[in-house]
Structure formats: C-alpha cells, structure tokens
Amino acid sequence: MSNSAEKILYRKAALIFEELGFLMPRPDGGRVSHNGTTRAMVSFKGPFSGCLLVSLSNEILSQLSANMLGDEQTPTEPLKHDSLKEISNVICGNALPAIYGFEPIFHLDAPVIHEETDSINLEYSQAAHVHLSFDRGNAEIILFAESNAPEAFFN
Amino acid sequence: MSFNILVVDDSAVMRSMIIRILRLTGLSLGEVYQAPDGREGLRVLDEKWVDLALVDINMPVMNGEEMIDNVRSNQTTANLPIIVVSTESNLARIESIRRKHVEFVHKPFSPEVLRKTVLQLTGVPNEQLSGENSLPQGGPDF
C-alpha cells in the first residue's frame, strides 16, 4: 500500500468484512484463484465527487451472502447482489470520513451493480486501490475521486 | 411480554441480518414486520401495533429522517422507541438525528452492540431474557 488513504481503506474494509460478513482476510494477502467477479459501485457527492468500486470473486460473494443471511435463507442471485451493494455502501460510508474527516457531509447514491463494460467518470482519478484475500477468493476495492480532491485522498 | 418489531432498510439482506440478531438477543419477539423504505414503514405503523422500530437513514422513496419526523408528529406513534442503524458518520448529522429521541447504532455493528441498545431501549432486564436464545457475551459463534 503506497499511501495513507490505502491503509485506511484497507483497515476499514477488513473490519467491515469481518463484522458484517463474518469473513476474515488472510494476513499473508496472497491472491486466491477464482472464477469470475461481481462488481458494485457507490457514487458520492460532497466537498468533491467520486465513487467506490468493489469487486468480489463469486465464491466470496456466495459466502458473504450466506453469512449475512444465516441459515434461514438460501442466497439467490438478487440477494447476493444486495449483499455486495450493502457491504460496498458501508465501506464507502466509513472510509470517506476516516480519510477526509468527520466534518464534511458526503451524500452516497444507492449502490449499483457495475458491469465490466460500464465506464467510470473520466474526471475521476484513482485515489486508493486495495486487495483483500480470503480463503476462497479475493476482494478488490478502488476509490476514485475528482482530481481536485484534497491531497489526503492521494497521499 | 412479546415485542412487535419493525425493521426498515432498503437492503433485504441487512433486514434479515438485523432480525436474526434480534432473535439471538433473547428478547421475546412477537410479530416482525419489514419495510424497504420510510413510506412503507409508515404504512406498517398505520396498520399494525409496533413496540420498537429499527430504521436506516439513506433509503429511496422516503429516507429514515423523514419517516422519523412523521412518526414523532403522529400522536399514536410519537413515543415509539426507534433505533437508527446507519453508516452515517458526520457528527453534526448524528447529533441532529439523536435530537429526534432515537438511539443510534453505527454500521458495521457487532451483534453485542445491537443487543445492548435494544435491551436499553426496551428496558428488559437481563434476567427476563429467554435463556435458550440468549446471545453469549462477545457475540454469537457464526
């Protein structure tokens, strides 16, 4: 991890996967091979705009959804998407103030499932990029922000 | 006494997770109602008796703050115990929400934090909880 924004994003994401999804990231951080990913995007507006992109390997998405639902429901495709959108929303809502401070108000749009072919606003620059590895797959999280966002986002 | 519960969150998975944790608190639950937004939540409150509501803030159609304002301005529901469960981190907004006489639980939450808040708000002492379903200290073994 090259900057403090990435360290904060990693710590927040790891905590949230643990508390909401009951998934513990592997400390070695090694990548696990997997079959395909599903992505969700959360756009935000506030002192500046941007978005958070969360990609989960499909094995982890199934496990995440099953853990969040418990034994009472089998995760269907819509429920898996709902799990990914919810965890993306919580990561974004926690990471932004941790990086930028608790005073500004950020408004988060409803998360959407983001297809590979969907584009990211070209005015956004990559501010932080982290990987989390689990026993059965990986998570990749990228934070984009307007290029005129404060330095805290890029340092 | 059984508590009728309303859980309002646009995420079906989060509603399910909250309900599962509530069942593990040992609190005696009666009817458990769900709504995906504030407007549907108000509709449930119009039609059913609810003892405790857990409400998200950022939702489509009608957000949680607007729903809570409606609840507080209605004589029938004005004193309904409400727990806001949200990712909101801005201190001024949290303070503004708390002034609506609600408890606040920040996402992500541990089962133990939600349990404590529910028990504090319902006023049920530990000894009256169902032993069979009680959440062990430190959280459930998921």
Image (tube, rainbow, N blue to C red):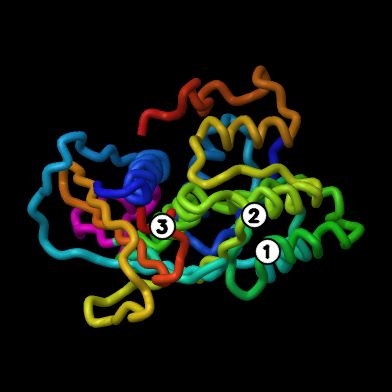
Residue B66, x across and y down, in percent: 74, 66
Instruction: Please check whether the numbered discs 3 and 2 fall on a single chain.
Output: no
Amino acid type for the residue under numbered disc 1: Gly
Magenta stretch in the rendered image: A55-76
In the image, residue A101 sits, relative to residue A110, either above or below, namely above
Q: Which residue is mark 1?
A: B41
User: Which numbered circle lies on residue B55?
Assistant: 2
Which chain does the numbered disc 3 sit on? Answer: A
Judge by depth and name the residue closer to the eye, B86 or A71: B86
The residue most toward the top is: B127
Amino acid type for the residue under numbered disc 2: Val
Dot 3 alpha-carbon crowd within 10 angstroms: few under 14, some 14 to 19, many 20 or more: many
Dot 2 alpha-carbon crowd within 10 angstroms: few under 14, some 14 to 19, many 20 or more: many
Instruction: Please check whether the numbered discs 3 and 1 fall on a single chain.
Output: no
Q: Earlier in the sequence, mark 2 or mark 1?
A: 1
The residue most toward the left is: A33
Q: Which residue is mark 3?
A: A153
Dot 2: element? strand
The majority secondary structure of the magenta stretch comes to helix
Which chain does the numbered disc 2 sit on? Answer: B
Residue at the spot 80% in from the left edge and 51% down from the top edge? B100
Dot 1: element? helix
How many marks are shown on the rendered structure? 3
For the residues marked 3 and 1, what is the alpha-carbon distance in whole angstroms?
A: 38 Å
In the image, residue A37 sits, relative to residue A136, either above or below, namely below
Amino acid type for the residue under numbered disc 3: Phe
In the image, residue B88 sits, relative to residue A40, either above or below, namely above
Mark whose residue sits in front, 2 or 1: 2
**Is there a contact, CB below 8 Å, between mark 3 and mark 1?**
no
Dot 1 alpha-carbon crowd within 10 angstroms: few under 14, some 14 to 19, many 20 or more: many
